[in-house]
Image (cartoon, rainbow, N blue to C red):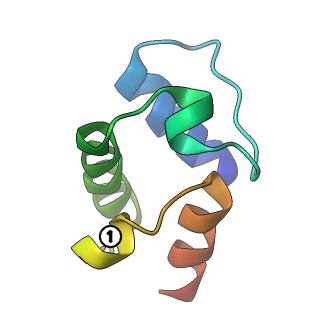
């Protein structure tokens, strides 16, 4: 799952050199804005065929938060 999320982030940012792990802080380490986070969530929804409520998106601080949410679905 981490690999797929990494692919999504690389595609969105247009940078294949991005490396993420569970501890990666989305806004600080990846320089993503709130808008970027919403776009990331939309891509994750499409990829994993899930729905992410807005309240859950604002709780995504690290990649581990995203992975945990997906695993719970």
Depth check, front residue: 46 or 35: 35
Q: Is residue 68 above or below residue 61?
A: below
| Residue 51 can be seen in this image | no
What element does badge 1 sit on?
loop
Q: Residue 70: x and y, percent?
A: 52, 74
Q: Is residue 3 above or below residue 1?
A: above
Q: Residue at x 67, y 61 (%)?
A: 64
Outermost bottom residue: 72
Q: Residue 58: x and y, percent?
A: 36, 65
Depth check, front residue: 16 or 52: 52
Q: Is 29 on the left-hand or right-hand side of 36? A: right
Q: Is residue 48 above or below residue 36?
A: below
Q: Residue at x 45, y 69 (%)?
A: 59
Depth check, front residue: 29 or 72: 29
Q: Residue at x 62, y 30 (%)?
A: 29
Q: Which residue is mark 1?
A: 49
């Amino acid at each position: 799952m981490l690999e797929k999320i990494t692919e999504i982030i690389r595609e969105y940012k247009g940078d294949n050199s991005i490396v993420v792990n569970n501890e990666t802080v989305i806004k600080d380490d990846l320089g993503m804005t709130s808008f970027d986070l919403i776009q990331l969530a939309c891509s994750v929804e499409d990829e994993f065929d899930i729905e992410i409520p807005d309240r859950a998106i604002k709780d995504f601080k690290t990649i581990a938060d995203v992975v945990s949410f997906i695993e719970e679905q």
